Image (cartoon, helix red, strand yellow):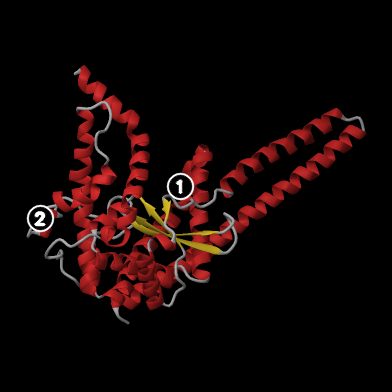
Amino acid sequence: MTPQSRVFDLRSRLARRLGLLSTGCLLLLIAALLGMLATVFVAMGHSWEGVLKGDPTRAGLWSLLAVTVALSMVRLVGVVCHTSPLPQGIRLPRQAAEDFYRLMDDIAASFGIPPVQHVWISCDMNAVVLQRPAWGWIGPIRTHLLIGLPLAHSVSAAQLAAVLAHEFAHLARQRSGLGAQAAHLRAWWARVLDEAFENFPWAADWLERRAHRFYRDMLRLARLEEFEADACAAQVVGRALMGETLVEIGLKARFLEQDYWPKVMAQSMQFPSPSIRPYREMGLGVAAGFLRRESVAEDLSHYEAGGGSLPLHPTLHERLRALGTPLRAAAEDQPSAAGHYFAPLLPTLAWAFDRAWWEDAREDWQQRYLDTRDD
């Protein structure tokens, strides 16, 4: 068995075990809720009997039990019924970007999966496949693809195809059929645990001991899924392009994080309100501000995508090593995927994201300006 096959097999077994664990825990919680509901009805029945027999003590105690259990049940329902997040961004209909949809259809066909119908443009330096049931907790799984506008400005059309191949590999290998339902149940149980920590702080230590292994294995699964998706995408677009794309995203993410956004925020020292629209200027900012150096290793020496204390994603070097490709960037700048696929939409998209960014940054921006004046 090759190392790649071992990763695929380990990912499959770990996903199956975590899926069964999550399903079992959710069923136990639902059974507990039903038991609590039955307790409320029984207690209310006994309370009514106490009233009929003229026994206020009995009626009061049973009523107190019913109210206590009912309040606990409502609190627990709030923990269990925390739905998966809705996609955040601007909906991209097929008619608005037909070439982009054709690219997605071709890549989906190469993986043997149905085309993705729900596409959103987000303000993140990321691309992600989001799946959620049609009715919140249950129902047919709907697939949404979120493409970040900063990402589209940072990669070429060919590199965006590699990004899509990676995301569709997740669908083909891990999120189709029963795999999609299992992923939903794992995510649901993880949300239940998160809500339990938030709502029952007195039980945090006990929950931590019980949930530690689940969280650890979910992190392991997330990392294995990334390696698997990289390998499957490389079979469609080629290892060289896949590796080059990972490096390009790392370089551009570093540029945006450490150069572009700090310069945007530096204006807060000089003006009471922004005079720059960062998303409108982002395409030009990336094209003109990003300097492609010969030493990629030096460029990324102090920046590492992935890793960290909660390594949901493998590091760039780990992913390149698994692919068997060198740390090598594109030889020259190429026209961006944003300009290639979304050119007519860019003014509208930028306006919407700039408006949202200004609303979020308004108070912090004004406080920075006032602090500077006071100094």
On the image, numbered disc 2 is attached to which residue?
298
Position of 315 with respect to 327 (left or right) is right
Asked whether 38 or 281 is in front, the reply is: 281
Quadrant for the N terminus in the image: bottom left
Quarter of the view holding residue 47: top right
Give x and y (percent) for residue 189: 52, 55
Q: Which residue lies furthest to the left in this view?
A: 294
Asked whether 151 or 27 is in front, the reply is: 151
Quadrant for the C terminus in the image: top left
Give x and y (percent) for residue 278: 26, 42
Give x and y (percent) for residue 355: 36, 39
Give x and y (percent) for residue 40: 75, 43
| Residue 193 visible in rendering | yes
Q: Residue at x 62, y 58 (%)?
A: 27
Quarter of the view holding residue 364: top left
Q: Which mark is residue 208?
A: 1
| Residue 255 visible in rendering | no
Q: In this view, does 307 lie above or below 72?
A: below
Position of 94 with respect to 39 (left or right) is left
